[in-house]
Image (cartoon, grey):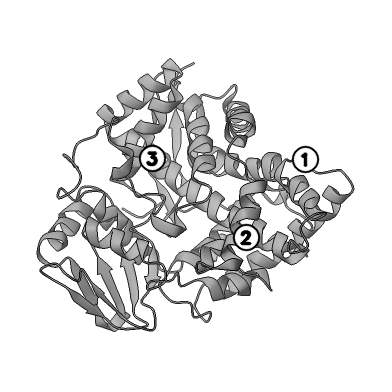
Amino acid sequence: MEEPEIAAPSAPATRAQADDPCAGFNIKAMDTHRVVHAAFNWLSDYPQREYLMGFFRRFWPILRIPFAHLVIVFRDEDVREVLTHDQEFPVPWGGKMIELSGKKNFVLGMKEGPEYRRNYEQLAKAFRREDVSQYVVPLAAKAAADILRGKLRIDAMRDLLWAVPAQLCEDYYGIEIPDKVLFAEWTIAMSSYLFGSASDKVATSGQPLALAAADCFLRLIRGAIEKARQGHSPGIVLPRLIEMQKSDPELKDDVLEAHLLGMVTGFVPTNLLASGNMLWTLLRRKDFMQAAQTAAVAGDDDLLWRCLREALRFKNFSLGPFRMCGPGGYKLTAGRRRPKSLKAGIGILASTQSAMFDSRRVTKPKQFDSQRAAEDYLEFGYGQHWCIGAFIAAAQITQTLKPLLQKQGLRRAQGAAGKLQTITVFPAHLTVEFDA
């Protein structure tokens, strides 16, 4: 059956003037290999993904792909070894991050050192742990409730799961955003370019779209900085950063811009992809859905997050993070029965998705268990580059899906509208219905 056409990403009436290149941004330009992406999305879904990864975990746990200059690591112990040796396996996207921001790197692209520690400290002061309960939870809950109010049918992906994280970038981050969907499209283009490969080479097919998105985003950030200096910011974080500049000479505007670009690019696309995969999994598994809805109706946010996190384990937002083998090379699993020498410069895919189903460490990995130990999860990474915004992400996703899961009779719409449509790996459309 022919795949349904994805609708235009945003209504022209909500865009800026037609001659504005940012208003004419088209995220569908990313999706030039629809058949390949469809095949990848099918293979990366459970259970077919687990059949494949289970085979490699058992028989070929460190897989070399010579033509791609890539090694994929499947077993939990090896994945954790790669992700805890940050000096030997640095992240590969620092150069791309500098290219997008124009001047500065972001912590996700840095090696451990003085610059990393200084930037991490600045971010910790701006994005505070106590903000989760004080700001993120009520703001995300309000945004989701406002979107769902009065509806019995909604495109859950585009109108809810794309919209709420973008709204939070305005209400919490402090970046005024005229068109939330268009803004989300910019972040998807940048995220795909930054994190989509194990190479830091900038000349890839996604480069022009990512650079165009970054230009539009930086224009928005610079306008937001000026408004914040005049006391007109709609949010919390940006005014804090402006205030921090008074006592921190290292926090110049280019650093501030890189902080916001990095935090938003890691937040919006990852959250819409994660929450989209969670919802898609729940809608196809009645037992998963029943557990999540019971928690949502009871108002038990902790249990609901556990259910959502467990659903995500069955369809994670990525196969795992990429790394590069450092200049000295590395002997992986040295001291065990099957050490492998990795050459300097080769790309590494540390498959956290596979590791979360590795029965050598995870108890009954193929069962849904809302009480699973936190250390069994690797969806936010591991080691130095564990996601700095993990608590914000968990709160936003939980509060976004909670009012939807509280709806009686929640179900997919009939026909093509009730089938998940994607742009590359990103959920784009899925209409759901529910009772009054």
Q: Pinpoint residue 218: horizontal percent, then vertical percent.
A: 72, 62
Which amino acid, mark 2?
Asn
Q: Which residue is mark 2?
A: 119
Tell whether 408 sits left or right of 259. left
Q: Residue at x 73, y 66 (%)?
A: 254
Is 160 placed above or below 108 here?
above
Q: Is 143 rendered above or below residue 174?
A: above
Percent coordinates x, y for residue 97 in the rendering: 58, 69
Residue 364: quadrant of the picture: top left
Mark 3 touches mark 2? (CB < 8 Å): no
Instruction: Point out the frontmost of discs 3 and 2.
Output: 2
Residue 381 appears at what percent x and percent y?
39, 54
Residue 227 vs residue 142, the one in the foreground:
227
Of tags 3 and 1, the one toward the viewer is 1
Residue at disc 1, secondary structure = loop
Q: CA distance from mark 3 to mark 1?
A: 30 Å
Which mark identifies residue 278? 3
Amino acid identity at mark 1 = Pro
Q: Residue at x 43, y 46 (%)?
A: 274
Seen at 22% across and 79% down, the residue is: 341
Q: Is residue 134 above or below residue 117?
A: above
| Element type where label 2 sits in the image | helix
Quick one: label 3 or label 2, which is nearer the N terminus? 2
